[in-house]
Amino acid sequence: MSGILKDLSAPALVAAIKANLFEWWRYLGSSPKAELYDSPELTWLLTGVPHSFLNSVLRTQAEPDNADVIIEKTLAHFRSKDVTKFSWWTEPGTQPKDLGKHLMDHGLTHTDGGPGMAADLLALNEGLPTPTGLTIEQVEDTEALRKWAYASIIGLELPETSVNTWFDLFTGLGFDLPLRNYLGILNGEPVAASELFLGAGVAGIYVVATTPEARRQGIGAAMTLAPLREARALGYRIGILHSSRMGLGVYCRLGFQEYCKMRHYTWAGKTSQ
């Protein structure tokens, strides 16, 4: 585990927002149910869950005259695994510098990505209302993990057929830090999920999800606060996350601020030209 970051300057927070995410992906790749490929030229992760955020090329260090060969070889492998949605990340330091042009030539589409956000854990707004009957528990066994997998898949609006793949992925990671999952139960029913990942010196929040019928009651905020409070108790000073459009207002009310966006390219099952 990295040393705990105390620097609240914008450059330090931007670096931590990005580094925590890439460490999270690599940690997912340590599950026996994931496929993590790492070579001098390329790093990518496949989880089997049909979402572009969960199947990603994380790093590219290719010579300009070899970029198209690497892209086509990677696309061919993804097609062989029936991966129809994935992202190809092009953070500063990517080589070649015009990788984006090569990716678009192969049918990928550019996106700015969602806001990368950070908050001082000593200055959170913890007074937001939560519904009566909501309890939040740490996931510590496979029975709770199965409920967490179902609530998160439904809350993320992914195909219900992905629940077993998602469950298997996290079963392979166990229940110890640096990663911990949280299950939200409302009146006896599992309705929400969230996840804490400690990496790059900060507390990363992932998989914040509420099932559609339980939304707009303050559950998402509560599910975000629970892992942040635990991280604070462990001595962490900074929380980071990558917001969807749906969650942006909630995170701002909790005290998060936007510091960056992460450029990447996405694939949605088109045929490479």
Image: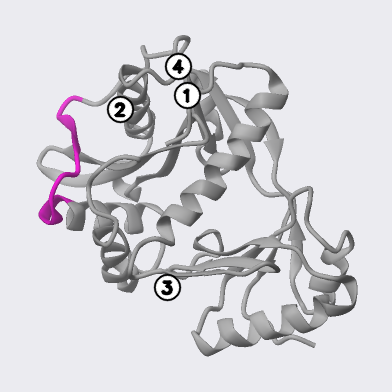
Of label 3 and label 4, which has the lower sequence position? Answer: 3
Of label 2 and label 1, which has the lower sequence position? Answer: 1
Q: Residue at x 70, y 46 (%)?
A: 262
Label 2 sits on a secondary structure element that is helix
Tag in front: 1 or 4 = 1
- Estimate the x, y position of residue 109 in percent, counting from the top left: 75, 67
Report the Cα–Cα distance between label 2 and label 1: 19 Å
Q: Which residue is mark 1?
A: 4
Q: Is residue 74 left or right of residue 70?
A: left
Question: In the rendering, which numbered label is found on residue 81?
Answer: none
Q: Residue at x 58, y 85 (%)?
A: 77
Q: How many marks?
A: 4
Q: Which residue is mark 2?
A: 226
Label 3 sits on a secondary structure element that is loop
Q: Residue at x 51, y 47 (%)?
A: 23
Residues at marks 1 and 4 touching, judged by CB atoms closer than 8 Å = no
Tag in front: 2 or 1 = 1
Of label 1 and label 3, which has the lower sequence position? Answer: 1
Q: Which residue is mark 4?
A: 121
Above or below, 193 relative to 198: below
Is 137 inside the magenta-drawn segment? yes
Label 1 sits on a secondary structure element that is loop
Q: Quadrant of residue 100?
A: bottom right
Front in this rendered view, residue 219 or 89: 89
Front in this rendered view, residue 144 or 3: 3
- Estimate the x, y position of residue 249 in percent, counting from the top left: 54, 29
Above or below, 58 relative to 122: below
Q: Which residue is mark 3?
A: 48
Q: Which residues are magenta?
A: 132-144
